[in-house]
């Protein structure tokens, strides 16, 4: 079950514009194990983690590293071995970017032991903060 750590930008009920919710600063918008809140991302991260990692890299690096290059580096480092160190470094960057707390376990542990859960949480975090990692550089900060 996902956490609801958001606030509404529009609080007037008579406002004709739809309400926009943003995650609270310093809090994850979803939990680490909420993978199935976004089944398509979970499936892609499970079967093709290089794609999910590449999209995350492109967003966090603000387009200076393309999705292709980020995913290629992750694949070249082998997602089962050294690629997890690469994933760990970007999880740490994401946390620093949004002032997110380190989970109950360290970023290194989460990226190593729960890589699919970590990737889907990071991807959802970017989406929940108004970015669209699937289109990459056109939606970064």
Image: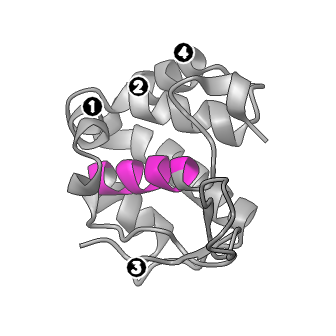
- Circles 3 and 2, Cβ within 8 Å, touching? The answer is no
Which dot, 3 or 2, sits closer to the camera?
Answer: 2
Picture layout, residue 99 above or below residue 104:
above
Q: Which residue is mark 4?
A: 68
- Density class for disc 3 (Cα within 10 Å; few <14, some 14-19, many ≥20) is few
In the image, the segment drawn in magenta is 116-127
Which dot, 3 or 1, sits closer to the camera?
Answer: 1
Give the mark nearer the N terminus: 4 vs 1: 1
Q: Which residue is mark 2?
A: 51
Asked where in the image residue 61 lies, by quadrant, the reply is top right
Task: Tell me the CA gap for discs 1 and 2.
Answer: 7 Å
Looking at the rendered structure, the secondary structure element under dot 1 is helix
Looking at the rendered structure, the secondary structure element under dot 4 is helix
- Density class for disc 1 (Cα within 10 Å; few <14, some 14-19, many ≥20) is some
- Please identify the residue farthest to the front as the structure is shown: 14
Q: Residue at x 63, y 48 (%)?
A: 130
- Circles 1 and 2, Cβ within 8 Å, touching? The answer is yes
Task: Tell me the CA gap for discs 4 and 1.
Answer: 15 Å
Seen from the viewer's position, the closer of residues 83 and 92 is 92
Q: Which residue is mark 1?
A: 44
Magenta-span inclusion, residue 97 = no
């Amino acid at each position: 079950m996902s956490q609801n750590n958001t606030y509404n930008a529009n609080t007037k009920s008579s406002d004709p514009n739809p309400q926009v919710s943003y995650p609270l600063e310093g809090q994850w918008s979803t939990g680490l194990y909420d993978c199935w809140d976004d089944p398509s991302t979970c499936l892609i991260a499970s079967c093709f983690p290089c794609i999910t990692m590449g999209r995350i890299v492109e967003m966090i690096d603000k387009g200076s590293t393309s999705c292709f290059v980020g995913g290629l580096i992750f694949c070249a480092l082998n997602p089962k071995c050294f690629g997890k160190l690469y994933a760990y470094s970007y999880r740490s960057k994401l946390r620093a970017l949004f002032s997110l707390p380190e989970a109950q376990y360290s970023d290194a542990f989460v990226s190593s032991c729960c890589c699919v859960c970590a990737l889907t949480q990071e991807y959802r975090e970017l989406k929940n903060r108004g970015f669209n990692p699937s289109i990459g550089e056109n939606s970064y900060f």
